[in-house]
Amino acid sequence: MMKPIVKLRGHVGSIFLVGQFDFNAHKAFRQASQELLDNSDITEIEVDFDQVPYLDSSALGMLLLLKERTSSAGKGLALVNCRETVRQVLEIACFTKLFNIS
């Protein structure tokens, strides 16, 4: 099961995902993102996909929900270190229009 790792760098909070990003990661991902949303020092949240070989539609839903929550909190959101397979899924879902992806 995936265990997100949260790291702080100044005003940037990163969620490092390791393993498959799917429905089973929902609770852990929500807890990790809530930790950053609740931190008033954090102005930008990065979700790091470097160690993610696969994501499914429920992961896309979790990202959309996080986007809503970061916007409401006045924080920025970026998806970083996307592998080619992950990037393809994000492009097919038209997430390139909604997210800052690198």
Image (cartoon, rainbow, N blue to C red):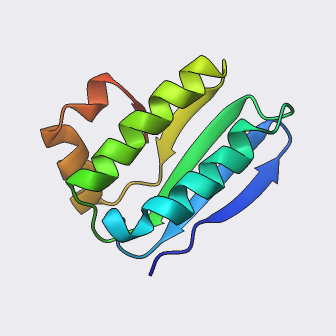
Residue 50, visible in the rendered structure? yes
Q: Position of residue 85 (x, y in %)?
A: 22, 61
| Residue at the (13%, 41%) spot, across then down | 92
- Looking at this rendering, what residue extends furthest in the bottom direction? 1
- Quadrant including the C terminus: top left
- On the rendered structure, is 100 left or right of 9? left
- Looking at this rendering, what residue extends furthest in the left direction? 92
- On the rendered structure, is 94 left or right of 1? left
Q: Position of residue 7 (x, y in %)?
A: 75, 58
| Residue at the (58%, 67%) spot, across then down | 4
Residue 25 position by quadrant = bottom left
In the image, residue 23 sits, relative to residue 79, either above or below, namely below
In the image, residue 51 sits, relative to residue 41, either above or below, namely below
Q: Position of residue 61 (x, y in %)?
A: 31, 43
| Residue at the (21%, 52%) spot, across then down | 57
> Considering depth in this image, is 75 or 23 the residue closer to the camera?
23
- Looking at this rendering, what residue extends furthest in the front direction? 27
| Residue at the (81%, 48%) spot, across then down | 9
Q: How many marks?
A: 0
In the image, residue 32 sits, relative to residue 44, either above or below, namely below
Q: Position of residue 97 (x, y in %)?
A: 28, 23
- Quadrant including the N terminus: bottom left
Residue 22 position by quadrant = bottom left
Residue 13, visible in the rendered structure? no
